[in-house]
């Protein structure tokens, strides 16, 4: 029941209080989710200089939105505004900017999936190209983070890997 | 609970609402209580707590519908959160922010926030709230932070939820009437 727009509406005093009251229970918001395309420039690596308190190199992230993400975001805002306007809703606030890079995170990637050992770590069954008995069955094989929570996909990929692993074992290939 | 008791309670509430509405048309039913005497909070000093209490009431004042931030004890709520915080930088930032607003009032009107006239307090608030969505000066950021917390405190209080927003939830329902889906 908390009136979320109390934290967003500008102003103070009687007019602010009345606005919150008028909107209470009738407030809704919409936000868009989109996939950031995987690009070579976006990467995570071991920092060559900064180490943690145990002397282990910390992670260094290089990550920026590209044109596709910016245009997709602008399109989302336009579409959502159109939907609200067509519904006869009063629009009280529009945020046009995407979240700051890295502020919404699912831990994925670093052992990307692919068919070419030169550009990927695991094959389509999450088996490493270099070590045949090693399967990486978490979110590391993702080449992008899609636009939603990854757990179901991680589980599905794991299932697929296990089926493959069992079949290969039966054939004596592992 | 029997149906008779609910009926009686409803009747009493209805009568009370009707009586108060008839007796006091267009008059603020919920006046802000007077500022409490200066006493130190669990974390904030007496002055800081009183300044926060005043700013909170200016953000969400009492009106005909309900009590304001003072009646809902928003300043005490925030003070309690500060007292239990393990983040010394965050705690100190509140002391600094409240002092800075108080000093700005002193510089502007020759009086601290607690001593300034109501119109002067209003002017000061308009000054620190003017760039709320894109604060640049420190006092403007302070206003945004204070307002966020006051709103959190107020609209999670009994006064904020039930008196102000008329939330009807969390009540005992004696009979399940249901819905006629045959029509």
Image (tube, coloured by chain):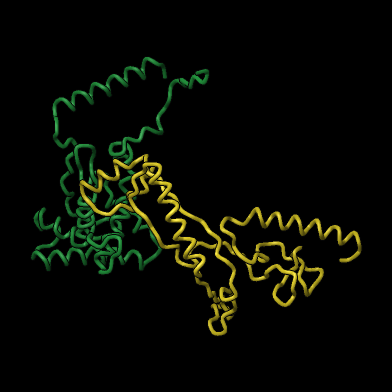
Chain colours: A yellow, B green
Taking depth in this image into account, of A41 and B91 the one nearest to the observer is A41
Left or right for B152, reference A17:
right
Q: Residue furthest bottom?
A: A49
Corner quadrant of residue B141: bottom left
Q: Nearer the viewer, residue B177 or A148?
A: A148
Q: Quadrant of the N terminus of chain A?
A: top left
Eyeballing the image, is A150 above or below B6?
below
Q: Position of residue A110 (x, y in %)?
A: 64, 71
Measured as percent of width and height from the top left, residue B16 is found at: 23, 24
The residue closer to the viewer here, A22 or A137, is A22
Locate the C terminus of chain A and report the quarter of the image it occupies: bottom right
Number of numbered markers: 0
Given residues B26 and B95, the one toward you in this image is B26
Is residue B80 positioned above or below A2 on the image? below
Q: What x and y, as percent, mark residue B71? A: 23, 44
Estimate the x, y position of residue B2 in percent, counting from the top left. Answer: 41, 16
* Residue located at (34% from left, 50% from top): B152
Q: Residue furthest top?
A: B4
**Measuring 16% from the left and 67% from the top, which residue is drawn there?**
B103
Name the residue at 35% across, 35% down: B167
- A30 shown above or below B166: below
Give the quarter of the image for residue B89: bottom left
Answer with left or right where residue A93 lies relative to residue A57. left
């Amino acid at each position: 029941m908390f009136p979320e727009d109390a934290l967003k509406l500008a102003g103070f005093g009687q007019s602010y209080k009345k606005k919150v009251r008028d909107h209470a229970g009738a407030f809704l918001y919409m936000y868009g989710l989109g996939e950031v395309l995987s690009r070579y420039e976006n990467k995570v690596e071991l920092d060559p200089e900064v180490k943690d308190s145990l002397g282990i190199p910390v992670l260094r992230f290089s990550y920026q939105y590209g044109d596709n993400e910016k245009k997709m975001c602008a399109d989302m805002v336009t579409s959502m505004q159109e939907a609200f306007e067509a519904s006869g809703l009063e629009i009280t606030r529009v945020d046009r900017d995407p979240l700051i890079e890295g502020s919404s995170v699912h831990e994925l990637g670093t052992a990307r999936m692919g068919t070419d050992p030169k550009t990927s770590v695991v094959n389509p069954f999450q088996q490493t190209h270099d070590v045949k008995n090693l399967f990486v069955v978490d979110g590391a094989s993702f080449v992008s983070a899609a636009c939603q929570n990854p757990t179901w996909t991680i589980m599905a990929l794991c299932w697929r890997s296990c089926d493959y692993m069992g079949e290969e074992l039966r054939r004596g290939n592992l | 609970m029997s149906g008779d008791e609910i009926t009686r309670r409803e009747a009493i509430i209805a009568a009370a609402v009707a009586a108060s509405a008839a007796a006091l048309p267009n008059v603020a039913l919920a006046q802000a209580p007077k500022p409490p005497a200066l006493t130190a909070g669990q974390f904030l000093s007496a002055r800081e707590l009183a300044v926060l209490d005043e700013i909170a009431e200016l953000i969400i004042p009492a009106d005909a519908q309900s009590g304001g931030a003072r009646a809902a004890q928003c300043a005490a709520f925030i003070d309690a959160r500060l007292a239990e915080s393990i983040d010394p930088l965050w705690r100190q930032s509140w002391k600094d922010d409240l002092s800075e607003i108080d000093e700005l009032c002193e510089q502007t009107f020759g009086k601290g926030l607690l001593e300034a006239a109501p119109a002067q307090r209003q002017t000061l608030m308009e000054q620190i709230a003017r760039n709320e969505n894109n604060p640049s000066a420190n006092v403007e950021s302070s206003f945004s932070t204070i307002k966020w917390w006051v709103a959190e405190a107020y609209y999670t209080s009994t006064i904020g939820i039930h008196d102000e927003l008329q939330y009807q939830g969390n009540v005992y329902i004696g009979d399940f009437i249901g819905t006629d889906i045959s029509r």
